[in-house]
């Protein structure tokens, strides 16, 4: 075949040819299933702007995005921070931003990585299928941007920022961790229309003149019954603090509830990405490696382009050693890529150790079938627990270092033996549990007919405690949304003992 490009220069016809060549390999040979691709060529300043808005093509205005842009731009101009080769958005069509400064080889790498690796993962992984709606996210972002702008015009920027600041502070606690139904963004607009129509039909200004019923006037038995029924409707405990405030806050206006809903819907949209960093990047890195290798084998890229690709690829999967000053944990690109290559090897050419560890697919001769199944059905925790094999652990020199409070030195508890491998994989998988991504804080109780104080509870596991100063500041934001006093108790998850109590001013 003829070369797709010769040298570093490229134009849009070259990008189109590269995309078609990658598609023939990814879809035609490897069996990947992807959304339609939309490739956007952007400048470095536009890439920084995309950073500031979490990589989304549309976003409502908020001062925190400008602050992040100013910080990232200063670091980039001074050489302290580089820019990603690409940003890819989980939408249909799948939007991939690529830098105009990239060479033709890097553009090929980016297209293989984002347009087919990440794209396939977004479309097929069960978490993204449960929690995101790729067909509707762009439309919802357009609605959110227009709605926030309208609120700023009608209510004033200060009032809007007050709600958004509080909602942003509580974003990690503004998600549902367990799906109750198939989540569709497209339904949000319809539900908002129904709520608006219901409010218009039932609005009667004369009702404001009718004296309200006071529960304190009821008999004790009736009061107790009313309180019990009202508390049952709250369905406590509730883990999604933003949802609880949106639905039950006594003080919020309708437009404020809609702002909270926008923040929590977008927080839910990003929820799968935090749980699939290793799996997602491992999928994309493995795909770009295989696609680029296949392009070279078929004569579509030159030896020089392959060497340039391998230089960039090696930098992406660099994993510093434990004693290296650059070590900051496991590189998700390196760990994910190593696991994917190991699974492909086990499917093709297993040894006795591989057959003992992976009897279900060792030697089945279908590496891409195995990988597509893993990419569709596992998040990081499950991927590492079930598919981190001994060869990967040995290549990464993984051991279990125990850090005991009473011992001034580290202790190596597990090494490279049968029991040690199992223990190391299990302990590493525990670090990717969703519960470790953000503290689990639930609404436990509320004084509905008295002071309306809201009681939150945090369960402390394995001695992990909240930062006191941050907890107090966050409670202030929670009080903005709830409208009344908020208190927080930290419990020991094993004994139930109250460890600390915090309260808003």
Image (spheres, rainbow, N blue to C red):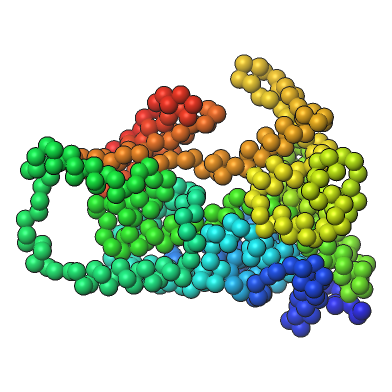
- All told, the count of numbered labels is 0
Residue at 27% x, 56% y: name it: 252
User: Does the image show residue 64?
Assistant: no
Residue 64 as seen in the image, left or right of residue 437: left
Residue 336 as seen in the image, left or right of residue 488: right
Q: As rendered, which of 66 and 471 lies closer to the eye?
A: 471
Residue situated furthest top in the rendering:
406
Residue at 77% x, 78% y: name it: 20
Residue 404 higher or lower than 133, as above or below = above
Q: Quadrant of the N terminus?
A: bottom right
Pinpoint residue 347: horizontal percent, then vertical percent.
Answer: 85, 53
Residue at 87% x, 70% y: name it: 295
User: Does the image show residue 427?
Assistant: yes
Residue 474 as seen in the image, left or right of residue 206: right
Pinpoint residue 170: horizontal percent, then vertical percent.
Answer: 42, 48
Q: Quadrant of the C terminus?
A: top left
Residue at 18% x, 69% y: name it: 203
Q: Quadrant of residue 356?
A: top right
Residue 419 higher or lower than 18, as above or below = above
Pinpoint residue 367: horizontal percent, then vertical percent.
Answer: 82, 57
Pinpoint residue 102: horizontal percent, then vertical percent.
Answer: 75, 68
Residue 102 higher or lower than 437, as above or below = below
Residue 246 higher or lower than 88, as above or below = above
Residue situated furthest bottom in the rendering:
13
């Amino acid at each position: 075949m003829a070369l797709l490009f010769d040298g570093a220069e490229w134009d849009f016809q070259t990008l189109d040819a590269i995309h078609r060549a990658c598609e023939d390999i990814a879809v035609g040979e490897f069996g990947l299933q992807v959304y339609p691709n939309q490739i956007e060529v952007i400048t470095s300043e536009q890439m920084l702007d995309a950073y500031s808005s979490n990589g989304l093509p549309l976003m409502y205005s908020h001062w925190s995005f400008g602050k992040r842009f100013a910080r990232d731009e200063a670091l980039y101009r001074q050489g302290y921070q580089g820019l990603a080769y690409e940003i890819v958005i989980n939408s249909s069509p799948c939007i991939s931003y690529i830098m105009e400064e990239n060479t033709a080889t890097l553009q090929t790498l980016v297209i293989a990585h984002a347009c087919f690796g990440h794209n396939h993962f977004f479309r097929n992984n069960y978490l993204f299928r449960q929690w995101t709606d790729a067909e509707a996210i762009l439309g919802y972002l357009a609605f959110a941007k227009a709605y926030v702008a309208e609120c700023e015009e009608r209510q004033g920027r200060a009032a809007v920022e007050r709600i958004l600041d509080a909602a942003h502070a509580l974003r990690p606690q503004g998600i549902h961790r367990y799906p109750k139904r198939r989540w569709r963004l497209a339904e949000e607009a319809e539900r908002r229309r129904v709520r608006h129509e219901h409010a218009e039909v039932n609005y009667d200004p004369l009702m404001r003149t009718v004296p309200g019923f006071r529960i304190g006037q009821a008999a004790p038995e009736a009061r107790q019954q009313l309180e019990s029924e009202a508390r049952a409707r709250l369905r406590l405990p509730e883990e999604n603090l933003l949802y609880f405030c949106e639905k039950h806050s006594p003080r919020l206006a309708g437009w404020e509830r809609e702002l909270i809903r926008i923040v929590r819907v977008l927080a839910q949209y990003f929820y799968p990405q935090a749980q699939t960093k290793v799996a997602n990047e491992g999928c994309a890195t493995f795909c770009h490696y295989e696609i680029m290798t296949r392009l070279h084998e078929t004569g579509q890229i030159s030896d020089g382009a392959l060497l340039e690709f391998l230089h960039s690829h090696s930098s992406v999967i660099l994993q510093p050693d434990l004693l290296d000053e650059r070590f900051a944990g496991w590189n998700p690109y390196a760990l994910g890529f190593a696991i994917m290559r190991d699974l492909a090897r086990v499917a093709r050419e297993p040894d006795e150790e591989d057959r003992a560890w992976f009897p279900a697919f060792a030697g089945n001769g279908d590496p891409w079938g195995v990988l597509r199944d893993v990419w569709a059905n596992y998040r990081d925790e499950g991927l590492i627990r079930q598919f981190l094999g001994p060869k990967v652990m040995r290549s990464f020199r993984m051991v279990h270092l125990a850090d005991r409070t009473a011992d001034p030195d580290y202790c190596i508890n597990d090494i490279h033996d049968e029991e040690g491998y199992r223990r190391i994989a299990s302990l590493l998988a525990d670090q990717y549990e969703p519960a470790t991504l953000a503290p689990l804080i639930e609404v436990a109780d509320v004084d509905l007919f008295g002071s309306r104080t809201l009681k939150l509870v945090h369960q402390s596991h394995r001695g992990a405690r909240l930062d006191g100063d941050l907890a107090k500041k966050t409670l202030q934001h929670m009080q903005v949304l709830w409208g009344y006093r908020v208190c927080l108790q930290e419990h020991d998850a094993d004994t139930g003992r109250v460890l600390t109590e915090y309260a808003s001013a």
